[in-house]
Image (cartoon, rainbow, N blue to C red):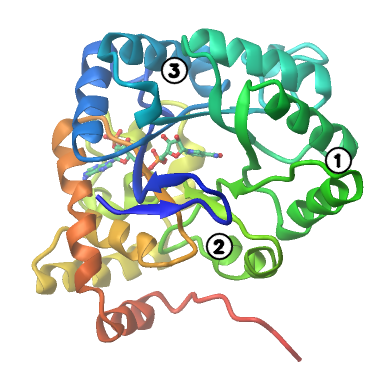
Amino acid sequence: MEYRYMGRTGLQLSVLSFGSWVTFHKQIEDHKADELMGMAYDAGVNFFDNAEAYAGGESELMMGRVLKNKQWDRATYVLSSKVFFGLQGKNNKPNQHGLGRKHIVEACHAAIGRMQTDYLDLYFCHRPDPNVPIEEVVWTMHNLILQGKILYWGTSQWSGAEIMEAHRVAQQYGLIGPVMEQPQYNMFERFKVEQDYLPVYRNVGLGTTIWSPLAAGFLTGKYLEGMPEGSRLAIEGFDWLKNRWMQEDKISKLKKLVALADELGVSMASLAIAWTIANPHVTTAILGATKPQQLTENLKGLEVVKMLNPEIMGWIEEILQNKPHLDLA
Ligand SMILES: NC(=O)c1ccc[n+]([C@@H]2O[C@H](COP(=O)([O-])OP(=O)(O)OC[C@H]3O[C@@H](n4cnc5c(N)ncnc54)[C@H](OP(=O)(O)O)[C@@H]3O)[C@@H](O)[C@H]2O)c1
């Protein structure tokens, strides 16, 4: 396993990590979660990702039970949660969601309780909240750090400008600013990581904990042959996700990528993951898996990344034709 410092912090994360969205509680039960987290940990994974909103708190409860059972030394792994969406979706009352101080603090206490831990290593604002002054968010996160309830705070799916605004406030009041972001990043979703955050990396530093490196499984190539039963894009209520990925142009590029992976003698999944972590701005790519074989396959990304020389990266770029470029005109 390779470990990378998270932006300009002193925290090292395994370049591949493990998350629970959709899978924990909805698709898998405790014994499978225990097996998958055990496999990941044994392979050197030291970061486990979660959020208040995942399965309405059930995902954190499940991870908490697994961790309690595992009895791993708390110093050997990094645990996260995220705040914003609340637990009850459309039934959230005012102050049960968003980034107001009341919800951030209450959600933090609740996540710590559900995961049966004393503190969260990473705490993310799961989305920006235009209704709350950024001063309130930065002060609240700063205070949670001083209280020892969280160690680092960051954002998820914020724009580069929003992150810089949080830093402006932090600098103004001498507070601790956001140090990591959790963006989506994969072969078909590149703008934030490759363009929007460039000034953030340069001016204040930013670790990135990437979600959906496989575009929810689409980039494994398995949907080219139909809809495997039980797989994520086939789950009822996930049409929005299916529609995001199952598009003509993406399917035709994916077919070419699968042919390239075949030529290289690697799986499409491991190639897509390797491509993601080949970007030095990536601290860690969070893997999701419902089956041990998937995790074994995806961990091979660690070997495949060593094959990705400029020539092969060039071939991939020729297929993708979606590299963001700065318009300096
Ligand atoms: N901050 C955010 O807004 C945000 C959003 C989304 C996710 N996340 C985090 O990022 C983590 C990873 O995201 P993700 O789960 O979307 O990652 P992903 O790697 O894009 O998709 C993972 C899913 O793809 C399928 N899959 C994985 N490996 C496979 C393989 N080798 N062969 C066939 N199918 C395979 C599995 O689903 P099936 O078996 O069901 O097909 C698996 O659950 C989440 O757990 C969560 O912690 C954060």
Residue at point 62%, 43% (across, down): 156
Residue at point 33%, 84% (across, down): 314
Residue 63, how many percent across, how many down? Answer: 38, 17
Residue at point 29%, 19% (across, down): 28
The numbered dot on residue 134 is 1
Mark positioned earlier in the residue sequence (2 or 3): 3
CA distance separating discs 3 and 1: 29 Å
Disc 3, SS: helix
Residue 177, located in which quarter of the rendered image? top right
Q: Quick one: label 1, few (<14), some, or many (20+) residues within 10 Å?
A: many
CA distance separating discs 2 and 3: 27 Å
Figure check: 32 above or below 295: above
Name the residue carrying label 3. Answer: 59
The answer, for residue 233, to whether it is visible in the render is yes
Residue 296, how many percent across, how many down? Answer: 15, 42
- Looking at the rendered structure, the kind of residue marked 3 is Ser
Q: Residue furthest bottom?
A: 329
